[in-house]
Image (cartoon, rainbow, N blue to C red):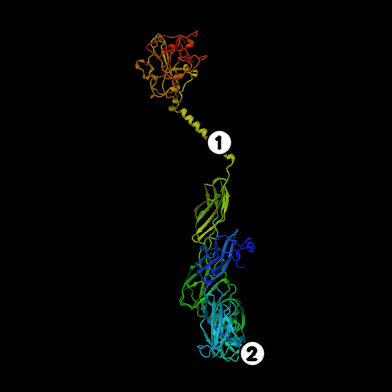
Amino acid sequence: MARLGNCSLTWAALIILLLPGSLEECGHISVSAPIVHLGDPITASCIIKQNCSHLDPEPQILWRLGAELQPGGRQQRLSDGTQESIITLPHLNHTQAFLSCCLNWGNSLQILDQVELRAGYPPAIPHNLSCLMNLTTSSLICQWEPGPETHLPTSFTLKSFKSRGNCQTQGDSILDCVPKDGQSHCCIPRKHLLLYQNMGIWVQAENALGTSMSPQLCLDPMDVVKLEPPMLRTMDPSPEAAPPQAGCLQLCWEPWQPGLHINQKCELRHKPQRGEASWALVGPLPLEALQYELCGLLPATAYTLQIRCIRWPLPGHWSDWSPSLELRTTERAPTVRLDTWWRQRQLDPRTVQLFWKPVPLEEDSGRIQGYVVSWRPSGQAGAILPLCNTTELSCTFHLPSEAQEVALVAYNSAGTSRPTPVVFSESRGPALTRLHAMARDPHSLWVGWEPPNPWPQGYVIEWGLGPPSASNSNKTWRMEQNGRATGFLLKENIRPFQLYEIIVTPLYQDTMGPSQHVYAYSQEMAPSHAPELHLKHIGKTWAQLEWVPEPPELGKSPLTHYTIFWTNAQNQSFSAILNASSRGFVLHGLEPASLYHIHLMAASQAGATNSTVLTLMTLTPEGSELHIILGLFGLLLLLTCLCGTAWLCCSPNRKNPLWPSVPDPAHSSLGSWVPTIMEELPGPRQGQWLGQTSEMSRALTPHPCVQDAFQLPGLGTPPITKLTVLEEDEKKPVPWESHNSSETCGLPTLVQTYVLQGDPRAVSTQPQSQSGTSDQVLYGQLLGSPTSPGPGHYLRCDSTQPLLAGLTPSPKSYENLWFQASPLGTLVTPAPSQEDDCVFGPLLNFPLLQGIRVHGMEALGSF
């Protein structure tokens, strides 16, 4: 039952397996080898017994490796009635796995049998076998390196034997030493050892795939003795002992007590605690001495020290390093050169500001704790009066009136440095000429000069921030000892975009020259900020901006141009480049009632800087303004129409084609006009009026219907009043021009001018202008006289002019003379003439000419 299980890991299937009559003892697995080399093939078979009555006659056997089904099983029935399935796994890549033989039974996959498969490697040969004789435990401790992992349970055994020679012959065997699991060392007790006699020792490794043995080690246990390290400590101070020298340490140690009878040698190592220095080895130390003075160390420095020992002169192993001991070396007096420089205050020359710089004369110059400035009064032997005691590199003090020089020393707990005299001399030497400076890069300045004659012994170079942030306390200085130098590169405390003042002073024997100074920039920078934008005026589609330029700044490159940027609410950006002299700008093409963001960028050769953003909104068009605009547009449209109408009406070339100009006979004044020239016709009271209104006084060509002498047949010789029809356009043929010339009436060729007067018989002395501008058309001839008793006649050509409808109810005396000639008011129709077919009867619907008979119009003869 222990070999069965549930492949599907379900509780229901497990309960079935536990029921009576289940599949126990139905199947059995056999494998070619349960442990193989990793990656080698393996073959397994599963046999189902014939007495399993719960199975089908031909059950299907399945294989699983771990949780995966494995194809390739070959199933067959044996002669004894059992079922057998064989499978071959070509590569076993699992170091540990379960191979199961299963059947489908019910709703789950049931395990008939399973075996555990292991794969790995045979053990490697152990190497680096070494043994140490521990005198504290009196045992031989051996250790080795097992080699790579085998993935299989591997056992190690330390084997040894006694031998009187070089281990060529094997003597008595020593009990095997088996280490604990996972350990690669083993201890052989003293009771199994034979001191001062060789032993053969090796390590054997074994697992299911093989066995391996390390090379044999032949040794004497006393030749591999390892001592314990001694204990380091510092020496107790003694009144009789001299104090340690500078850079030295005095130390001692206590040896390991079990090794007191063993001759040994020791060595020491040390390293400073600061930094990442490596260990320095000192040895061998004296054999019998238990104390030592270590020199050549840095003064005032903490060190870490360790010691170890080995059996000497017999063979042995070095002991481990002892626990660390920390000691500090003593200090030495500073060994430095102090370069000095001084300045006097202008208001109080006896107040001196002294500067100095320590220059180490050795690699180990000693630690400096402070500086002392003092002077020695004359007449007081051995008296030294301090003026200043400080840890800084400068000091300000009041110089006594009798003092011409002071002494400067550096000190620490071990002593003082050599005193440096400072002489306060006057500036009597020649000055430098042609001092200049220029920037090499943002962090350095080159200062150059032309040396005077004679050559100085050296120079003092000072530099610091120039105005407006100049301060003597922040100046940096150095001393140039080479008097023939013509320049120096300043690298200390140089920052970009700063103005520096550089001062150079020549130094001579017992005096100095006047100081010269020059200003220089390490690097020019872009404008610190751009001008602030201001809104001056704004409209619906424009905005006027202005700004005040920033004043020039020291160290700032001059402006080259401005660039103004504006962005609308839809993130559409616009820009314009302006000259550096610009003070304002007008934005055009803006949208009404829209929001805009505007900023100004000031640019120079060193860079550019943006101003703050100005936000504005354009104005919104008002309703009244919109109405005014629409009203003005309508008025303009009306004026355009009126002008077009007037032009069409007043232009002669365009009026008649559209509509003819018809005079109003009801308001005619023909009766008030008299001819300026009266012509006598044959017969009594013969006269002829050639009537024409003043509007038709311009020169016209004679009409075909006009005749010079017009005589109506059967009417005698009455005076004739003519109304001549004239066309305005000569080029347009009248309707009767296409007739024969014999049919055309003979009309007068002279158109006489009439003037309006009260008495028609009186001759007018004020002739009308013959160059009138009226374009009225005369459309008939009036025959007769206003004093004639008979009815009048009129002559009308084939005119297309329309006639008026209805009669004039009360015509004047000069309008229609036939009203006065006929007392009864009847119409008298004259006989038609065959010679003049232009004469026709009375015109119907013409109030002025109602009494005129028109010849050729028989349809109107009864009127």
Image position of 506 with respect to 544: above or below = below
Q: Secondary structure at mark 1?
A: helix
Counting labels gives: 2
Q: Which residue is mark 1?
A: 631
**Residue nearest the observer in this picture, 822 or 805:** 805
Q: Secondary structure at mark 2?
A: loop
Label 1 vs 2, first from the N-terminus: 2
Q: Is residue 782 left or right of residue 29?
A: left
* Quadrant of residue 335 within the rendered picture: bottom right
Percent position of residue 477, x then y: 53, 74
User: Compared to 758, does 201 lie above or below?
Assistant: below
Is residue 476 visible in this depiction of the protein?
yes
Q: Is residue 408 visible?
A: no
Q: Residues within 10 Å of mark 2 (few under 14, many from 20)?
A: few
Q: Nearer the viewer, residue 827 or 88?
A: 88
Distance from disc 1 to disc 2, alpha carbons, whole Å, reads: 121 Å
Q: Nearer the viewer, residue 165 or 531?
A: 165
Give the residue type at disc 1: Gly
